[in-house]
Image (tube, rainbow, N blue to C red):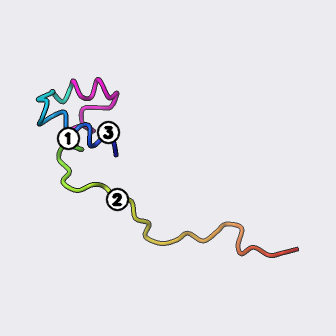
Amino acid sequence: MDIIAEIRRRHPVSRESISSIARSLKISRPTVRKHLKTVDETVYRRQSQPVPKLGKYKRV
């Protein structure tokens, strides 16, 4: 999340180029463009809780 904020600050405020931002943060130019296009912060939300592979815990 810090990288997204850094990209959003550098490009419009500092007038730094996309290539320069990508080089200094060691990420690809398409990734920088993608983060500049986003409006909202990305939030991960799980659709459903996965079932444990071992099943329910049983005391032995």
> Label 2 is placed on what type of residue?
Val
Structural crowding at the residue carrying mark 1, measured as other residues with C-alpha within 10 Å and reported as few (<14), some (14–19) or many (≥20): some
Give the distance between the C-alpha atoms of the residues marked 3 and 2, in whole angstroms: 15 Å
* Contact between labelled residues 2 and 3, with CB atoms less than 8 Å apart: no
Coordinates of residue 49 in the picture (x, y in percent): 52, 71
Q: Residue furthest right?
A: 60
Under tag 1, what secondary structure? Answer: helix
Residue assigned mark 1: 8
Image quadrant assignment for residue 52: bottom right
* Contact between labelled residues 1 and 2, with CB atoms less than 8 Å apart: no
Image quadrant assignment for residue 13: top left
> Label 3 is placed on what type of residue?
Ile
Coordinates of residue 33 in the picture (x, y in percent): 20, 39
Dominant secondary structure, magenta: helix
Residue at image coords 20%, 50% = 38
Residue assigned mark 3: 3
Residue assigned mark 2: 43
| Most foreground residue, 24 or 31 | 24
Q: Earlier in the sequence, mark 1 or mark 3?
A: 3
Which span is picked out in magenta?
20-34
> Label 1 is placed on what type of residue?
Arg
Q: Is 49 left or right of 10, judged from the image as shown?
A: right
